[in-house]
């Protein structure tokens, strides 16, 4: 179950009239930006004409015992979120989307999910917002849980309209709205590699960890590793930028994977586990840097294989941030949602996910990152571009001509989390002091379940 729901803001003002369950079912992927397989989707309706408002998506819980509390939580979340954005919904449309399991028919899926639909209708009604329609979409067919008329909603279901043939499809094409395929396909772009090269990538991560982790635990070494990481990431972005996209996204992903060696991927993956380094890398969020940076973070997320899967939280969050910054909210929610499944405590992903779902303007975050980059440049620490030129690497031992240590403002070093199943590497020097917040975060986990990793 995906415990991190996704919402969107109100729909655009362009008027499109949808008549009946068939057109509602066909409109769903255009409202979401993708085909939401294995999902509960709630859409708020406003006014006498049923204007679309906020939308919310959650993975269907596998256990029916979770359906009642989930239904109550979703209804409350959508209604309260709509009120915060302007007005309480006058109604709700519910979609349950799930393809049949092996040996199961789509009609059987519809019947199996009927109690979930009823719980959602009851939860919304309890909050005095009626459900006008509840649809099940499975294997190219749809059913209505609300319409008793077999003439328009037969027991065997109705076939969805052919792609691109409906009124909604024409309006979406005119508006430039793109459907990116299914949610499963979008998540597949971010999943760890399972091909034979995955074993070589894991070995490269082991080797890089033995070298980099002790350096990162040392104050001076941490700054050097940060500069090296950002310089390497900049070179990879340039390499990707010079390799234009060819074909669809699947061909592009394969080409990107071939452009990055196992050692390069390992070095950047481990380097951006440091929070400050990750935040400096997040500055590649706009302009010509953004598209190749997004391709890089996706490629690195795929390289977090085997026991290193939790390390994917950093590149996934960066991918979600760049997608949101460039206006691709569906891709941002998918990446951030996956980051939170990998590591539910990853603070940067949680904050971005909430901000994206609340419909906030990403310019607020962009301006903060720009200001932080300017501050680092003025203090001599340098931003991503400075690090790429080598300016971020200290050319002495950090002391002035009089032998006293220079005053530098820098975040406290953080401990890195070893991959699950691997022994923690001994630090090269004294361990940094633990912060109270880090102690609380670690205390919330079972002892010995996992190590610690910076980048929160």
Image (cartoon, rainbow, N blue to C red):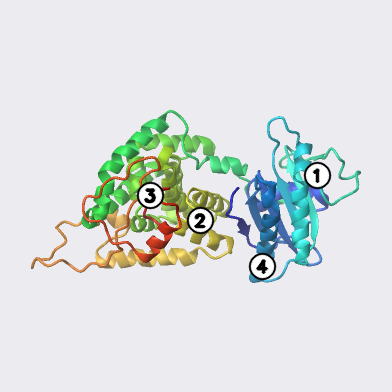
Q: Is residue 34 left or right of residue 356?
A: right
Residue 374 shows which numbered tag?
none
**Residue linked to disc 2:** 326
Q: Nearer the viewer, mark 2 or mark 1?
A: 1
**Residue linked to disc 4:** 80
Q: Earlier in the sequence, mark 4 or mark 1?
A: 4
Q: Earlier in the sequence, mark 1 or mark 3?
A: 1
Q: Earlier in the sequence, mark 2 or mark 4?
A: 4
Q: CA distance from mark 2 to mark 4?
A: 28 Å
Q: CA distance from mark 4 to mark 1?
A: 28 Å
Q: Is residue 156 left or right of residue 431?
A: right
Residue 404 x %, y %:
12, 67
Q: Are marks 4 and 3 in contact (CB under 8 Å)?
A: no
Residue 451 shows which numbered tag?
3
Can you name the residue that lies furthest to the front here? 447
Residue 240 x %, y %:
40, 42
Crowd tier of the residue under label 3, counting other residues whose Cα lies within 10 Å: few below 14, some 14–19, many 20 or above: some
Tell me what residue is drawn at x 23 percent, y 67 percent.
408
Residue 18 x %, y %:
79, 54
Residue 196 x %, y %:
43, 28
**Residue linked to disc 1:** 143
Above or below for 306 versus 334:
above
Q: Earlier in the sequence, mark 4 or mark 3?
A: 4
Above or below for 269 versus 431:
above
Asked which secondary structure carries label 2, the reply is loop
Q: CA distance from mark 2 to mark 1?
A: 36 Å
Name the quarter where the C terminus is drawn.
Answer: bottom left
Front residue of 421 and 362: 421
Crowd tier of the residue under label 2, counting other residues whose Cα lies within 10 Å: few below 14, some 14–19, many 20 or above: some
Asked which secondary structure carries label 4, the reply is helix
Q: Are marks 2 and 1 in contact (CB under 8 Å)?
A: no
């Amino acid at each position: 179950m995906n415990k991190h729901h996704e919402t969107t803001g109100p729909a655009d003002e362009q008027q499109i009239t949808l008549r009946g369950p068939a057109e509602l079912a066909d409109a769903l992927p255009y409202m979401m930006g993708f085909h939401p397989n294995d999902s509960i989707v709630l859409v708020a309706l406003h006014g006498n004409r049923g204007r679309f408002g906020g939308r919310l998506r959650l993975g269907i819980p596998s256990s029916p015992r979770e359906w009642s509390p989930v239904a109550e939580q979703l209804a409350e979340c959508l209604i309260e979120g709509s009120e915060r954005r302007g007005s309480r919904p006058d109604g709700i449309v519910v979609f349950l989307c799930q393809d049949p399991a092996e040996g199961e028919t789509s009609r059987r899926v519809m019947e199996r999910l009927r109690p979930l639909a009823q719980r959602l209708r009851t939860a919304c009604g309890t909050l005095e917002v009626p459900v006008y329609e509840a649809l099940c979409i499975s294997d190219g067919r749809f059913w209505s849980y609300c319409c008793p008329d077999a003439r328009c909603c037969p027991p065997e279901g109705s076939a969805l309209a052919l792609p691109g043939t409906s009124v909604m499809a024409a309006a979406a094409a005119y508006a430039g709205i793109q459907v990116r395929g299914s949610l499963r396909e979008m998540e597949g772009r971010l999943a760890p590699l399972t091909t034979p090269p995955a074993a070589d990538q894991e070995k490269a991560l082991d080797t890089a960890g033995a070298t980099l982790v002790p350096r990162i635990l040392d104050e001076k070494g941490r700054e050097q590793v940060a500069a090296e990481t950002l310089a390497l990431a900049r070179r990879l972005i340039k390499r990707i930028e010079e390799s234009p996209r060819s074909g669809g996204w699947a061909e592009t992903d394969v080409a990107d994977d071939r452009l990055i060696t196992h050692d390069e991927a390992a070095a950047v993956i481990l380097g951006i586990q440091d929070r400050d380094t990750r935040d400096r890398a997040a500055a590649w969020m706009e302009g010509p840097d953004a598209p190749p940076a997004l391709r890089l973070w996706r490629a690195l997320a795929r390289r977090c294989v085997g026991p290193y899967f939790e390390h994917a939280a950093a590149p996934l969050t960066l991918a979600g941030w760049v997608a949101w910054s460039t206006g691709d909210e569906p891709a941002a929610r998918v990446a951030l949602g996956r980051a939170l499944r990998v590591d539910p405590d990853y603070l940067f992903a949680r904050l971005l996910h909430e901000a994206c779902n609340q419909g906030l303007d990403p310019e607020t975050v962009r301006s903060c990152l720009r200001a932080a980059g300017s501050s680092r440049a003025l203090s001599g620490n340098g931003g991503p571009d400075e690090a790429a030129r080598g300016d971020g690497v200290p050319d002495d031992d950090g002391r002035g001509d009089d032998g006293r240590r220079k005053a530098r403002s820098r975040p406290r070093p953080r401990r890195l989390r070893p991959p699950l199943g691997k022994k923690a590497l001994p630090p090269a020097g004294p361990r940094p002091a633990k912060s109270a917040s880090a102690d609380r975060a670690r205390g919330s986990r079972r002892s010995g379940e996992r190590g610690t990793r910076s980048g929160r």
